[in-house]
Image: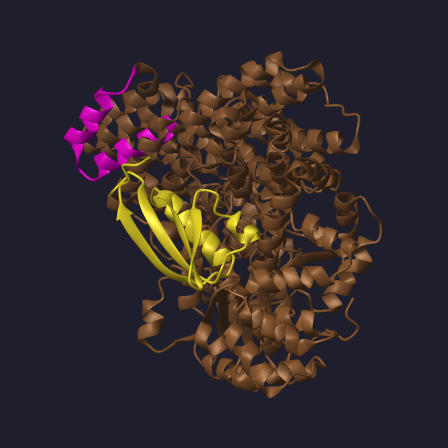
Chain colours: A brown, B yellow
Amino acid sequence: MAPTPPRLIDRGDLLAALDRAVASKVTIISAPAGSGKTSLLRAWAGRPGRMDGLALVQVQRDARDAQQFWLAVFDAIRRATGSNSGAQEPTTATPDFNGHAMVDRVLSELADAPGGVTVAVDDLHELHSPEALAQLTRLLTGLPSNVHAILTTRHDVRLRLHQLRLSGELAEIRAADLRFSERETRELLDASGITLSAAGVTLLHQRTEGWAAGLRLAVISLVDHPDPERFVTEFSGSHRTVAEYLLAEMLDREPPDVQDLLLRSSLLDRVNGELADLLTGRLGSEQILLDLEDANAFVESLDPGRVWFRYHHLLSDLLRLELRRTLPAEIPAMHRRAAAWFTQHGEVAEAIRYTQAAGDWREAAQLLTDHAFSLTLDGQAQTMQALLQAFPPGEDHTELALVRATVDLLRGRLDQAAAHLTVAEAHAQSAPPGRRGRLQVAVAALNLSLAGRRGNFDSVVDQARFLASPLTGTSDEAIALGSDLRAVALMNLGTVEAWSQGLPDAERHLQEGAELAREIGRPYLEVGCLAQLAFAYIFHSAATPKADAFATTQRRCREAIALAERYGWGTEPVIAPALMTLAGTMVMLGELDEGEQWLQRTEQALQTDTGPDIRLLLHQTAGMLYAGRGRRHEALEEFGVAEDLAARLEGSQALASQVTGWRLATQARLGRLGEARADLAALDDERAGSGEVRNALAAICLAEGDPVAALDALHDVLDGTAPVLGYATLIEAHLLTGLAHRELGDQSAANQAAEQALALAEPDRLVLPFAMTGSAELLDSLPRHETGHAALLADILDLLHGSSPAAEEQSSMPPTEALSPTELRVLRFLPTNLTRPEIAGELSVSPNTVSTHLRSIYAKLQVRDRSSAVQRARELRLLADRRTR
Amino acid sequence: MDSAPSRYVIRIDGHLGTTVLSAFPALTPQHCGPHTLLTGLLDRSALYGVLAEIEALGLDLLEIQKLGPSKDR
């Protein structure tokens, strides 16, 4: 080992050039291998006195996984800005990565950073993901003013940065700028303690053409060389290429064990002492690696603890060639040893890569299949796909059908997924007993996922039996794989059950899935199960009016969303069911503004998802929102889209009848009677007989001026003959009945129907059906003293007359002393026309008690009279809160 | 686009040694003054593969010449 390591010299001119460059938004350092790009970047970043944060991202060799790249970027930025602590969990990968949302997060993290930040991406040419490059372009063109970026690359990368170039925001440092001058060559030699004549320096500079890697290699050989002048003369007289000549010289000067270690460990993209020992069959590799790094011999550690090392890419490429030339027969065995080590240490992707490199395709296929679920959960779906593509045509094992199905499902290619699943199922049956169980659960989990995506829920029961007994394993790893699998299967099963079968099964499986996920540290699955649980609950609670069903649902939604947010998944597809459900319940309760906000977030979360089921709900809820606001044209459009999506589901008729019913009724209310009639006639008997479509028929009849026919249509709904999706359908039926009676001039029957609707709506305070049916006049003419639901009625009329309080006003209000439950009860009568004695009668208390409460209410709300109390109460949303009722 | 392989001559600065030459098994090397000529039949993707190797190994590419489809192979 050389006693005096060559040092990097302070290349002041070059650093100054980079300083000038980073005055621009983006700096690209583009130059061939060995030009000293990374050295420049590190020297610049490590200078004393640099004030802003540096987020340095090293692109892995042949990187193909957009998510892995962006997670590295995000974590580097959070480290640089010091926001790496607090309530947030470390960024965690998800199976459904949303690149667009990720860039948004990166941008907002940067915008919030105190002081400046430099984002540096080293070896960008290794990033072979068009998706990641497109997102990077978006990041670079949208950087906040306190942020700039430096990219290093071997060749110009296809980023679309014309705009930056035109506006002078793009600076470049290229090979010619990086070249060492003769003076710098001299300084480098001096700094390394090498004595060389002026002529020798000139010769060396000419021969290497100032190429950084060449000079560094030369210095390693020149340190302690008995005759530096002769070395330079010989080098100069040779026609060999610079790198090859100097590499041979350098290796020659190393002891045989170091040479052997360099050659053998060049096989791996990263190496540690243990692995190097395995590959060389000797101990003590770690010390050699440390010495090589200290000698600046193109070996660098990857972590502060100096456990992992990598070689300069140019050097490792040359060494690999030499290894293949000199020890070709040993390479497969070395790959196998590395694969075994990585398998043992849970680094699955690398283990599979080296198993493939060894040519052990069958074993590689088995490893990949066994780990498909875990890799997906680890957010390495794109890595998995790259590994899958690496199998040559002749090695297409049926084993891999399961992996192909997984990838197809993730990409939304459902038909291909189904075809591969059929092959995987047959393969599982013929597998040895030890693996058969696990493969069958995996196939079942994927079948469930496919069924969910297609809305074909009939196959569920059949798949559930694979989950009856827990998977057992003989090793920790087998148990872990089994748990991942089981948790995924439970989530998929519960999800499908939520859509089809019924609450008890769905709730049981989702809860079990969430618990298991928490135990095994898979927050993604926990969030997924909880999000589906919230949806399952409302979906099935809607069957009967039940006090607090909506409140419970909303609480569950918020809990699931809070958990998702801790991991940075607040707008990921996995939480979409909870966002959707929260939006839907808000709209149902007449909280339209808040509902709209949640709906927008759902839409964001669903950017990358392709399943028709949840999109159906998205459009249906948007339609409800428009209908609630009286914007029927837009509502019709949304219901239409939702219905098209429903047609793509193979099951779930109940949901379909809901959206069909609303679409037809909206058509009728818009006066498109011909269309509505024609579409109604085209429905099959089952759909046409549903309560939702009967309601629509009633709405059509009303619009046609035939209230008697409307009453006739509603008969089956009200007497329970027609199946209904939820009791909201019954509220609608009562309201339509009331409207029909009103048309017929029977005010008393109309009032009675309205009162029945109110009674049904009261426990959950469902407001939307009143808006959707256009029942304002029906309610207006309901005498106040005839209703037992005065407060609800007032809320509904607020909404129908467009005076819903804006959600954002809430936070700007000065704090108010909390009202007692009794005061709240009194308060809810204030919007009505009831007098004090009448309120006292309603509450079964004396008028004096009511007066006392009123004074207290006025004082607490800081108002002087009843009407301003009502207004203030609305602003504070005290009238809508049902928990204190 | 021409899909048939063509004969290419690739001129690189310096003399390539056995280690570096092993990266180009499909090409025949020949020294030409201070340069190395690599000659062989390549289709387009093979050509780009060779160029990527040249880049990765830090070689100095001077010239690429296409001699047209070969009849002698």
Q: Is residue A113 magenta?
A: no
Q: Is residue A660 magenta?
A: yes
Is A419 situated left or right of A90 in this image?
left
Above or below A481: residue A819: below
| Helix, strand or loop: magenta stretch | helix
As drawn, the residue found furthest toward the top would be A430
Q: Residue at x 43, y 52 (%)?
A: B30
Is A407 situated left or right of A801 in this image?
right
Q: Residue at x 52, y 36 (%)?
A: A390
Please provide percent x and percent y for residue A747: 30, 35
Q: Residue at x 48, y 65 (%)?
A: A32
Above or below A15: residue A446: above
As drawn, the residue found furthest toward the left would be A674
Q: Can residue A866 be seen in this snapshot?
A: yes
Residue A294: image quadrant is bottom right
Above or below A125: residue A712: above
Magenta residues? Answer: A656-684
